[in-house]
Amino acid sequence: MIRYFLSLLFLIFCLPQRAFAEELRLAVLEFKSVGVNDSSLLFQLSDEARGGALDVFPASTSKFSVLTRENILDVLKREGKDESCLSEQCVITLGRNIGARFVLVGELTRIEMTYRLLLQVYDTQSNDLLGQKTVQNDSKFALIDGTRKQSAALIEKELGKYDEGRTGRRKLGGEKKTWSLEPTKKVILGVDERIEDGFLRVDGTQKCSSLPCSVYVEKGARQLSVGGEDCSSWEKTLSLTGSQKISPNLTCNYGYVSVVYEGGKLYIDDVLKRSVAKERTPTGSHKLRWESECFETVEKDFEVGDREAFSFEPTKTPKMKGIQTEAKYDTGEAIKAASVFLDGKKIGVTGETLNIPLCTDSVEVEYDAVRQSISLNRMENVYSIQFDKVRSSDLYEEVLIPSGSFMMGCSEGDSDCFSLSKPRHKVTLTRSFYMMKSEVTQKLYKHVMGRNPSSFKQRKILSWILQKGCGDDCPVENVSWLDAVTMANKLSKEEGLEQCYQFGLFNLVVIWKNKDCKGWRLPTEAEWEYAARGGESYKYAGSDNMDEVGWYRKNSGSKTHPVCAKKANGYGLCDMSGNVWEWVWDSYGGYKGSSVTDPVYVDKSSPGRIRRGGGWRYGARRSHVSYRLRYDASSRLNGLGFRFLRTGKK
């Protein structure tokens, strides 16, 4: 015994080249799986791959030896390993140890209902992966059949060149009969029947708990039993001499019902169902009913056959109702025949009865190019909407400011200029823009925002006594920088323009989308100063005499005044110096002195923003077109307002 063992070790480890020089050996290792718990299927697939190898290299005409399972498992056992060792290096090592020049391995996976088998051929001498093929199918039987064919195709492609003549005899260890090729004692038994909880029993032992299935069984006479819950049964004794597939043709008294629906209530045979997705249902006639608050009831009679699938999706026909709409001005004056739209399509005009789906959330009413939405409910049938008699565009004038270059900062020879406005430097603006002729008035602000926060507004002390104040035509004040950018978006939306600002973090973070946005926005600091200078070289916006162009501490009487009561500058803009300060977009940043194009400065770490132009309570020096002052963006003062612009052509 010891002598035999030592001889075997010498054969395996010391003389692999000499011992196997006369023949080429191909080993088909046991296949492994990932996520597929079916050892019998892996067993069958491995054997079919060996069968494919023998189809390419027949026993009597090839110099290739295709090793059997018994050959391989015997050597693995001696090596202290099992057939689950299938890493690339392990495969190559095992192939060498069993004297196989080439090895074929397989890995089985399953994605949803599809089986996928990856076949690979390795060369144990060069450590190379020679090639691979994939077999996939929903059916186990088709997968098994395809494995034999694809294994043969892969082996022929990668290994056929080593035995092109197929004229040699296959030698299997010489006279010592080192390798055994005894036929297997098991056969494949398959059941071609579709029953989810079906069973196959062989000699009283259950082999499968779902059909179809395939298993290995011992050859010979076997007592077979096939059946399932709510199905007929089949019993028979068969003599198994080779692999076989049986088709019992059982009958079952159930099928499957699936109904796809959203909302409402579903009844089958007057029983309320929460959801129906492949629900097991007795064979025969059935009734279906789907009820919805928004859609007409759907009823259907249907039949369920033996293990057949019935699928249904109710056709949604909206329930309808009639509504009437009316449109008015904010003055109460009626508007006749305004257009009514549903989902962007005109369906009629105000004053008519319009039929719409019961569960419609809203319709739109359009008059004189202004479109507004009306929210609907299922209970009411009459709706009113109000249009502004006066539009926001009626409450301001705009002036086109051409693109160009200018010297920003302290004017030449201006001895009163503050250091924050130095050094003087060249700025080029590549885009023209439309700027409001005056600061935003109280009337415009109230029209867009629905309130007037100004300190200098008219108030009633008693019902018959009117307190004097500046009123609607005076600039709005007591507004923060955040108030200004919020109004800019609202005004743009009202006029159908692009909204230039995005808000985040509880509306405390504001992002300007891009410089080409065509909606209303605050001017940059450079745009403001360029417009204020008006193409001229004055200290103030339109003159070297502050009294001509603006309201300040000496002439304001400690209050604001109606806009455009003073001389305009060279571009036709009013009150760019004095009356109220004006917010601009930029944070404070020191001038560098070098030439710049379309400059914008925003310091995300600072809450401060720049205000320009001076105001009614300050001296004339603060109203210089170059003067700049930083202030917290959330601050509101009774001398601080703003004006908007919108980008023109570049």
Image (cartoon, rainbow, N blue to C red):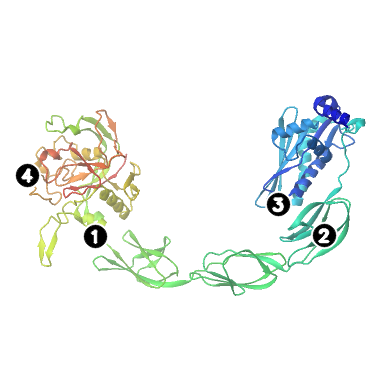
> Secondary structure beneath disc 1?
loop
Picture quarter with the N terminus: top right
Please name whichever residue, 101 or 298, is drawn nearer the observer in this view of the structure. Answer: 101
Disc 2: which residue: 204
Mark found first going from the N terminus, 1 or 4: 1
Q: Distance between the residues labelled 3 and 1?
A: 70 Å
Mark nearer the viewer, 1 or 4: 4
Mark nearer the viewer, 1 or 2: 2
Disc 4: which residue: 554
Disc 1: which residue: 390
Furthest residue toward front: 2
> Secondary structure beneath disc 3?
loop
Residue 4 pos. (x, y %): 88, 30
Please name whichever residue, 196 or 378, is drawn nearer the observer in this view of the structure. Answer: 196
Disc 3: which residue: 138
Query: Does residue 172 appear to the left or right of 565 in the view shown?
Result: right
Q: Are marks 4 and 3 in contact (CB under 8 Å)?
A: no
Mark found first going from the N terminus, 2 or 3: 3
Kindly identify the amino acid type of the residue bearing the numbered disc 3: Asp
Q: How far apart are marks 1 and 4 (CA)?
A: 36 Å
Furthest residue toward right: 175
Q: Distance between the residues labelled 1 and 2?
A: 92 Å
Mark found first going from the N terminus, 1 or 2: 2
